[in-house]
Amino acid sequence: MESPARESPPLLRDLFPACAIAFAYFLLLMVTSTRYGYFRDALYYLACSHHLAWGYVDQPPLIVFFAWLVRHTIGTSLPALLFLPAAAGAARIVFTAYFARELGAGRFGCALAATLSAASGVWHVIDHQLAMNAFEPLFWTGCAFVILRMIRTARPKLWLWFGLIAGFGVENKYSMAAFALCLLAAMLLTSARKFLFSPWILAGGGVALLIFLPNLIWNIQHHWPFVELMHNIRESGRDIVLSPVAFLGQQILIMGLTGFPVWITGLVWYLFAKEARAYRVFGWAFLFTVGFFLMMHGKNYYSAPIYPLIFAAAGVAVERFTGRVAVRRANLARTFLKPVAFGLPLAGVALLLPVTLPILPVATYLRYQSHLPFAVPRSEHYHMGSPLPQHYSDEFGWIEMVEAAARAYHSLSPAQQAQTAIFGNNYGQAAAIDFFGPLYGLPRAISGHQSYFLWGPRNYTGESIIVLGGDYESTRSHFASCEVVPTEENPYALERKPVLLCFGLKENLQTLWPELKNWD
């Protein structure tokens, strides 16, 4: 049971520095929200929000609901789209500090945990996009926090809360299930295993299943499209497969290279500290989770949501170490160790901030990038064609592409326009038409890529099609004629393939549609 040996300091006192850090983090994200442009995936989620369903080919439904909510409340400006992910990032920082407090940290430890969470460059990238990844650590840390409270209070009834959080976590991103399994496996190796043999865990599992059930039914009805998608991605070799050394090296880089000596103490504390024996489960859960994504050749940020647990423990470990040093050498702890603990992660994030947040003009950023001692990691082979990292390059080129499509569309007679489809070879191109197109008098796009395939070709038959991003020779072979539409290329864009105006599809689009499915 939880020990009442000493009265806990007021919660607000311990978390006030963390709240201040989180607020500053939120402001930084919002101030930079209007730099560059709309990210590809955000445009796609907005397109999906016009087709509300219990599932989509490449994600569960929660992020689409968030997009629908934002679209119907605060709008679709860049600050509006970034409000929820920025708020989720701020919440992650406070939650990390709260986790540290529950582990036994005081004000200093909570502040350090919050600093580590705010100074991890990968979160600047993730929280600057409307995407499911920004919300993921709240669900992962929430499940771990339930286990932590269960350990401290010996209340297995808390499995109901675990199931509730995990259920919504799976509706946000399927990797929630992988983390939950890693966490449960870690419990088997520690004294926390006793909580696994409780009927309440079945009740919690029932809650999670009930929340996940609508998406499960959708997947069954649509023959498991996400499983097919994952299979196709592996078969196509789309993603860059990292060696174990490269994967672990990138973990350190994206979480803060200079802060590594500070935050790694959290893992050491979990695994070896005597006072952390009851919390060993989180150290093992970290190793299992990182190991899982390493073996599955996951992208470097897939394991990022586990790190708040490590940052929280680092706050405890450093606070207790400096406390012991302070007993013997107060000046050393006060004037050296504590400032260094904060300074190392902050120095790293300050030096690399242009890589993770759009604070520089693009030309200036490219000059800055050319002087970096390392190459900014890329996760897909397709990304190698851009001078910018993918999280920047996918924000350029959409307007130029839509304008080219509009020129082609408005060059046609009204009768031809009525039967002209705009076909995107990928969901980014199609979603850009759907978002920007109404400003240019364009109809909504069609595509065979991801969930667009499920929405079908509508009433188009193929008399004329504006093809976005198609290879001229291969596209030309399917039509009576094709012409390249003059396009002002954006040198920073990932999308640089031509816009084609094609006439006379050799097969009716309605019958051809099943062959256009592209789940990759």
Image (cartoon, helix red, strand yellow):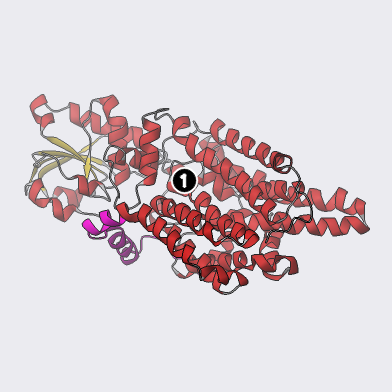
Q: Quadrant of residue 367?
A: top right
Q: Is residue 419 left or right of residue 208?
A: left
Task: Return the x and y of residue 215 as percentages of the image width and height.
Answer: 31, 53
Q: Is residue 397 visible?
A: no
Q: How many marks?
A: 1
Q: Is residue 480 left or right of residue 44?
A: left
Q: Residue at x 52, y 45 (%)?
A: 125
Name the residue carrying label 1. Answer: 391
Q: Is residue 210 left or right of residue 121?
A: left
The answer to whether 70 is drawn above or below residue 429 in the figure is above
Q: Which amino acid type is marked by label 1?
A: His
Task: Return the x and y of residue 116 as percentages of the image width and height.
Answer: 66, 50
In this orientation, which residue lies closer to the viewer: 110 or 301?
110
Which portion, as a residue range, is magenta? 216-244
Q: Magenta residues: mostly which secondary structure?
A: helix
Q: Is residue 72 visible?
A: yes
* Mark 1 crowdedness (10 Å alpha carbons): few <14, some 14-19, many ≥20: some
The answer to whether 363 is drawn above or below residue 389 in the figure is above
Q: Residue at x 55, y 73 (%)?
A: 188
The answer to whether 98 is drawn above or below residue 226 in the figure is above
Task: Return the x and y of residue 185 as percentages of the image width and height.
Answer: 51, 71
In this orientation, which residue lies closer to the viewer: 342 or 349?
342
Q: Quadrant of residue 487?
A: top left
Q: Quadrant of residue 429?
A: top left
Quadrant where the N terminus sits is: bottom right
Q: Residue at x 34, y 47 (%)?
A: 61
Magenta-span inclusion, residue 241:
yes
Q: Secondary structure at mark 1?
A: helix
Magenta-span inclusion, residue 340:
no
In this orientation, which residue lies closer to the viewer: 265 or 19?
19
Quadrant where the C terminus sits is: bottom left
